[in-house]
Amino acid sequence: MFTVNENYLKLPGSYLFSTVGKKEREYRAANPDKKVIKLSIGDVTQPIAPAIIEAMHKAVDEMGTAEGFHGYAPDLGYEFLRSAIAKSDYKARGVDIDIDEIFVSDGAKSDSANIQEILGPDNIIAVGDPVYPVYVDSNAMAGRTGEYDSASGMWNKVIYMPCLEENGFAPKLPEKTPDVIYLCFPNNPTGATITKDELQKWVDYANEKKALIIYDAAYEAYISEENVAHTIYECDGAKTCAIELKSFSKNAGFTGVRLGYTVVPKELKSGDVALNPLWARRHGTKYNGAPYIIQRAGEAVYSEAGKAELKKQVAYYMNNAKVIKEGLASAGYSVSGGVNAPYIWLKTLNGMTSWEFFDYLLNEVSVVGTPGSGFGPSGEGYFRLTAFGTYENTVEAIDRLKKLI
Ligand code: MLT
């Protein structure tokens, strides 16, 4: 008889955004007359920028010609895209990343889940709490997280680093030493970030403890403050301790297009074993590459026209973040985030749990958000709103929330 991966049986409930989506669909079905505003999953609403659409059209036409047809993509991604990434995301910030250290993929979500495959099964992981659930769930599926305790909402082999109001919703260096540390700045879900000097402390700590940092920089385009690193490799010594994950979803609206990349520096080693060839091996064996058309779209993100158009798109969403943050704060809500990130983190009203507040907002004002506790136990009593809605819907949602206080 075949058996199943029993680690899956230990997972609590369903994936956070699947649960939120199901509740939203049920509410819509029961209330067809209500205008529901969705500020839950961080999914973009603005159309793909013209320079990118043009590049995609061109690539589609090429595929219909004998000379321009492209089959399987190279394992690591097309050189034209990896060169554009190396130049614009790294060299322009004074960081040298070789194109062989860049692995193009279908997005940061899958990379953040898959990267643990090249790590030993006994590694102890440390995560911020609250945290993007994929990091923990993917390690749970691999059997690395021990047992789940439903009372505390914690896995007994995971080191949780609470991100609370008193520490600016950013984790402190853990007391117990982890093998792998997941960091996400600007942070999903709290919208908080740390300065480059603070990030340097994590890099120094990881090098000292021989730990690996998996650095999720998916929201880098939303950094507005000067003293925040745009890549972890701005910190000295990061190449010997950090892998960086990047996404085209949030800066270029590729949530439905799918494109991302991961940087695994050649200097990064566990003892004598370099991680770069391991990830290359995994990539080559399990993945046939993002489509040519999509990689050409990614290249256009770095064109002069693409950059200018995307700057406006990011500004549009950050204006929504301002509308949410200032609107809620003026009404008396306790809010944070939204300055270097498209997420606003707020306290629920009247001591409600996160899920109670979710139901309350849905039933009273037909607004969908994401319950903080879905991201981890320290998120209990908090709620996340995304700035990725349309401006009009964002203004309307905030007007509705203001009336509740
Ligand atoms: C989120 O809402 O946290 C993100 O959009 C989910 C994701 O990027 O996978």
Image (spheres, grey):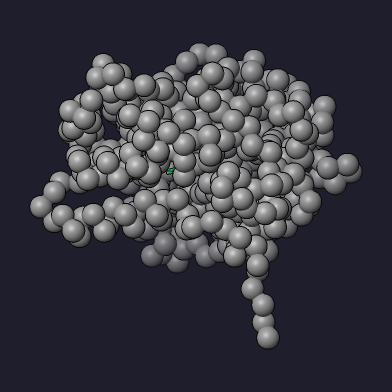
* Residue that lies at the very extreme toward the bottom in this rendered image: 1
Kindly identify the residue that appears in the image at 58 percent across and 44 percent down.
Answer: 152
Q: Position of residue 219 (x, y in %)?
A: 47, 33
Name the quadrant containing residue 361. top left
Kindly identify the residue that appears in the image at 56 percent across and 20 percent down.
Answer: 167
- Horizontal arrangement in the rendering, residue 64 relative to residue 295 (left or right): left
Which quarter of the rendering shows the C terminus? top left
Which quarter of the rendering shows the N terminus? bottom right
Q: Position of residue 156 (x, y in %)?
A: 69, 47
Q: Position of residue 45 (x, y in %)?
A: 29, 42
Query: Compared with residue 60, is residue 272 higher up or lower down, i.e. above or below?
Result: above
Q: Determine if residue 188 is in view.
A: no
Q: Nearer the viewer, residue 376 or 37?
A: 376
- Horizontal arrangement in the rendering, residue 152 relative to residue 297 (left or right): right
Name the quadrant containing residue 228. top right
Total marks placed: 0
Q: Determine if residue 2 is in view.
A: yes
Q: Nearer the viewer, residue 56 or 4?
A: 4
Q: Position of residue 9 (x, y in %)?
A: 59, 65
Query: Compared with residue 393, is residue 36 higher up or lower down, i.e. above or below?
Result: below
Name the quadrant containing residue 347. top left
Kindly identify the residue that appears in the image at 69 percent across and 38 percent down.
Answer: 159
Kindly identify the residue that appears in the image at 47 percent across and 58 percent down.
Answer: 14
* Residue that lies at the very extreme toward the right in this rendered image: 272
- State which image quarter holds ligand 1: top left
